[in-house]
Amino acid sequence: MKRIILIFGIVLLGTFNFGLNPPQDPYKIKVVVIDAGHGGKDPGAHGKFSNEKDVALAIALKLGAYIQNNFPDVKVIYTRKTDVFIELYRRAQIANKAKADLFISIHCNSNDSPKPFGTEAWVMGLHKSKANLAVAQKENSSILLEANHQKTYDNFNPNSPESYIIFSLFQSAFRDQSIDFATKVEHQFKTRAKRYDRGVKEAGFLVLWKTAMPSVLIETGFISNPKEEKFLNSEQGQDYLASAIYRAFKSYKKEMEGDNYIPPENKDSSKKGDSVVKKEKPANKEELSKKEASKEKSDKKENKKADLAKAKKPEIIFGVQFATSKNKKPASSKSFKNLESVWSYYHNGYYKYVSGKYPNIKDAISQMKTVRAKGFSDAFVVAFKNGKRISPKEAMKLINSKKP
Ligand SMILES: [Zn+2]
């Protein structure tokens, strides 16, 4: 009987939420991971008289001290505090284990020419130029010093541009926040530290890819530029840079914890990958979820009908999402440009169109190239588990865990 009352109570609370629940904890930045790039046998880039690993560590420690002194309730975790080698995946692992709210990776840039100078803040994404790819390649090549890098990173070759296509699949759920923080960092570099701001950019950095929180990789300057190398190695220069990042942190924290901020649904992996879609109008949540449930049902029926059911239905499927619309379009719609096996699902008030159903991600990637070539340049790979959207990352994890 007690159990029945309890269940009834839970159902009641869930269904008729009249605001009886105490107000929820506001979103808080509680844990920050500061990652000094390189270390130990990996010196990173070098200038005339210094190594990136030492500059990065000095700035990282100064940044941590600023945060700690001003926000004693924020936990600061360093991936390294001394000159030691730490694998890239482990840096991310440290942040994930600590359930960090923000990951800040500190580096210096370099170039064959001594001319380039200035700062950059990078977020995880697909590079838009060869120059951007080159920065990620340089930073990722640290893994070549790791003993088991082929196995650890699934044969990822930091020097091969083809390896980077994988990053187009993983639309980070934290992209907006990462860009937000990165923008603040660059703004502070410019105004506070009087650096030349080269902007916020995106590319496939392994260290960011593996983190499950907003994360930014900061190039604090070009160690290959004699003037900048001097600045990067000076006490004052490091102070300026660290305090600029600290100010960006402070402003980011304030914004995230503000009354008007709605925390992202980070914990819900089914939402991952949706960041490509423009922000949708907030609607009545309950109404929406009911609608969604019924639509999902009918969509599932259609999906079953779809032609790809040759093999036994795999529990996990991949497809290429390429369009969304408010009103449902038939699969034969001209706007789909004769794409193969188009089907749709309904989510958050929108119909989302997917081409293909594949049991493995490789086929989906190759289909993505086709779809993009047909003009849907923003197409990306999506994954479903029993009809429910999950992140491709999670799908791959599930598939891999099934293997003996
Ligand atoms: Zn670096």
Image: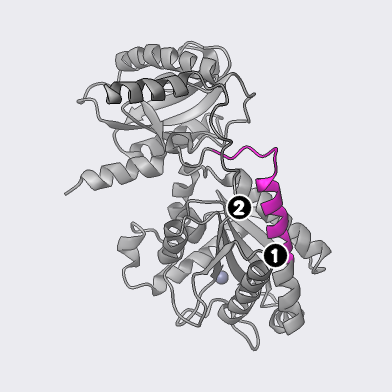
Q: Quadrant of the N terminus?
A: top left
Q: Closest to the observer: 225 or 386?
A: 386
Mark closest to the chain's N terminus, 1 or 2: 2
Mark 2 secondary-structure assignment = strand
Q: Which residues are magenta?
A: 244-264
Q: Tell me if residue 185 can be seen.
A: no
Mark 1 secondary-structure assignment = helix
What secondary structure prevails in the magenta region? helix
Residue sitting at 31 percent across and 13 percent down? 305
Q: Closest to the observer: 138 or 402?
A: 402
Residue sitting at 31 percent across and 27 percent down? 386
Vertical position of residue 89 compared to residue 307: above or below: below
Q: Tell me if residue 2 can be seen.
A: yes
Residue 133 in picture, x, y percent from top left: 56, 57
Q: Is residue 163 left or right of residue 397?
A: right
**For the view shown, which residue lies furthest in the left direction?**
404
**For the view shown, which residue lies furthest in the front direction?**
2
Residue 247 in picture, x, y percent from top left: 74, 62
- Residue indicated by mark 1: 246
10 Å crowding of disc 1: few (<14), some (14-19), many (20+): many
